[in-house]
């Protein structure tokens, strides 16, 4: 049976995926990177685009190859570890960090400039309204194409075009010299800043949302699901790349108008106000709120579908409600506070997610997938722990950590990369000698 999706629905699906990825981190980190990188912004942008665009696209490819879910892409790992890792990723990308951050950024950038004085009460009311809307749209996961892809995202894109072209048509300054670590390794620094968008983690989540919406529109065959998942992923990746590049340039030309910002959100606010006055603040408020709302909907939907599969006795609607309530709680913390709280977690989860994505892409060609998966991911996890301990700077651990400083990438949070690649190659060669079990479902 030849299953087809109309051009309108293909574009709508691409817009939906783009909108789900384009959230808080996607808007606040690139301007800050651009300002700090200055004249070296394109090197930093290249690194950022690898982790902020390339990896999410590969994640969608990998997820669609295995059938659409996190449990499928990690199936060669022991079942308890699949559950533990999946739970951690879905909690971080969902109610504990990424989703509350969407409300925080929306409040700080979208509402605070219009308030005579910000307070905890106004932040609470805003978060309640924000998550009430996201709850309402998330309880119908098969209808996101209509609500997000065809309704909210076109308005968001129109506003983004105005904001993105403004610093190109009417720049408020010129890029200066690179600052801080961007003077030495702008590419690697940009690569690591791309972690903060968490889009590689999101790709492991959003795969199931894409598959669910395709199935609800009559696409059932595996080949068709794979084809349309990739098509929508490419549309989303192109959109993200264009937004990032414009925001990098905005940040690089913002030093005169925003000389000492606390975060990228403040750069955006100051830039928009300088260019357009009150209208600019309203424009930015609309962009940020819509972008963050679509991401919140996507993350809540993906996390709820995952936990709905895990806890069969609890309804999907109840899980959406519980997650939304937890989001309200964490959304009433400070933006910088919540970012600092979860950076150590990302230094562990992101390398593992990168490993899962690449292993998912080459799984069909591995002679012994179970051996390669477990050895490679164990190496990645161990060295990510070492990296975390290093930045904590515990004096008693320094003699233990000293030998690891000889591994390339130790100072750049990339200590896991070369050893993981080495183990990957070794286990591929060993795989030809060690025959995998006939049943790949390991305990």
Image (cartoon, rainbow, N blue to C red):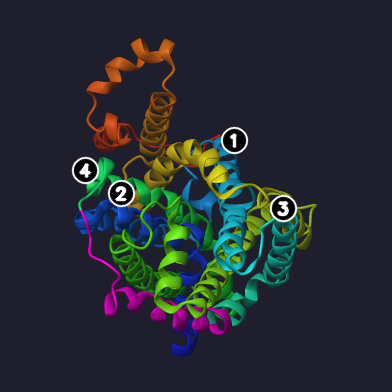
Q: Is residue 325 left or right of residue 304?
A: right
SS state under label 4: loop
Q: Which mark is residue 203?
A: none
How busy is the neighbourhood of tag 1: few (under 14 within 10 Å), some, or many (20 plus)? Answer: few
Task: State which tag comes first along the sequence, 1 or 4.
Answer: 1
Given contact means CB atoms under 8 Å apart, are the residues at marks 2 and 4 in contact?
Answer: no
Read off the residue under disc 1.
Answer: 80
Task: State which tag comes first along the sequence, 2 or 3.
Answer: 3
Q: Which mark is residue 185?
A: 4
> What percent of the width, then of the height, locates residue 261?
42, 53
- Compared with residue 203, is residue 411 higher up or lower down, i.e. above or below? above
Gap between marks 2 and 1 measured at Cα: 31 Å
Q: Nearer the viewer, mark 4 or mark 3?
A: 3
* Residue appearing at x 35%, y 17% in the figure: 401
Q: Nearer the viewer, mark 1 or mark 3?
A: 3
164 in magenta: yes
Gap between marks 2 and 3 measured at Cα: 35 Å
* Residue appearing at x 68%, y 49% in the figure: 310
- What segment is highlighted magenta in the picture? 150-176
Task: State which tag comes first along the sequence, 4 or 3.
Answer: 3
How busy is the neighbourhood of tag 3: few (under 14 within 10 Å), some, or many (20 plus)? Answer: few
Read off the residue under disc 2.
Answer: 191
Given contact means CB atoms under 8 Å apart, are the residues at marks 1 and 3 in contact?
Answer: no
Gap between marks 1 and 4 measured at Cα: 39 Å
Task: State which tag comes first along the sequence, 2 or 4.
Answer: 4
Task: State which tag comes first along the sequence, 1 or 3.
Answer: 1
Read off the residue under disc 3.
Answer: 120
How busy is the neighbourhood of tag 2: few (under 14 within 10 Å), some, or many (20 plus)? Answer: many
Given contact means CB atoms under 8 Å apart, are the residues at marks 1 and 4 in contact?
Answer: no
355 in magenta: no
């Amino acid at each position: 049976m030849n299953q087809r999706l109309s051009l309108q629905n293909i574009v709508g699906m691409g817009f939906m995926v783009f909108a789900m990825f384009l959230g808080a981190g996607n808007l606040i980190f690139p301007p800050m990177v651009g300002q700090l990188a200055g004249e070296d912004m394109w090197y930093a942008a290249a690194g950022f685009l690898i982790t902020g665009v390339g990896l999410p696209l590969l994640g969608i490819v990998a997820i669609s190859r295995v059938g659409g879910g996190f449990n499928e892409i990690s199936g060669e790992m022991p079942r308890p570890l699949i559950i533990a890792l999946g739970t951690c990723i879905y909690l971080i990308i969902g109610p504990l960090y990424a989703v509350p951050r969407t409300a925080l950024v929306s409040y700080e950038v979208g509402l605070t400039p219009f308030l005579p004085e910000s307070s905890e009460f106004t932040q609470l009311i805003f978060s309640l309204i924000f998550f009430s809307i996201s709850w309402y749209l998330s309880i119908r996961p098969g209808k996101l194409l209509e609500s997000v892809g065809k309704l909210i995202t076109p308005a968001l894109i129109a506003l983004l075009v105005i904001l993105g072209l403004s610093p190109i048509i009417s720049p408020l300054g010129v890029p200066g010299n690179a600052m801080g670590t961007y003077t030495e390794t702008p590419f690697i620094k940009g690569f690591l800043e791309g972690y903060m968008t968490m889009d590689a983690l999101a790709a492991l989540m959003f795969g199931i949302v894409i598959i669910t919406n395709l199935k609800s529109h009559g696409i059932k065959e595996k080949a068709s699901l794979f084809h349309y998942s990739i098509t929508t992923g490419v549309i989303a990746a192109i959109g993200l790349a264009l937004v990032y590049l414009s925001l990098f340039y905005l940040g690089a030309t913002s030093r005169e108008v925003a000389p000492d910002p606390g975060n990228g959100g403040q750069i955006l606010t100051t830039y928009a106000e300088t260019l357009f006055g009150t209208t600019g603040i309203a424009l930015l408020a609309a962009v940020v709120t819509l972008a963050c709302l679509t991401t919140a909907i996507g993350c809540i939907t993906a996390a709820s579908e995952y936990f709905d599969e895990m806890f069969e006795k609890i309804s999907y609607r109840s899980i959406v409600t519980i997650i939304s309530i937890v989001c309200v709680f964490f959304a009433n913390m400070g933006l910088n506070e919540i970012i600092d709280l979860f950076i150590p977690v990302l230094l562990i989860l992101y390398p593992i997610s990168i490993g899962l994505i690449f292993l998912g892409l080459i799984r069909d060609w591995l002679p012994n997938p179970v051996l390669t998966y477990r050895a490679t991911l164990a190496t990645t996890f161990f060295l990510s722990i070492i990296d975390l301990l290093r930045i904590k700077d515990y004096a008693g651990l320094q003699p233990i950590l000293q030998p690891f400083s000889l591994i390339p990438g130790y100072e750049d949070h990339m200590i896991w990369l070369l050893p993981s690649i080495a183990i990957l190659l070794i286990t591929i060669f060993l795989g030809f000698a060690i025959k995998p079990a006939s049943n790949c479902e390991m305990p």
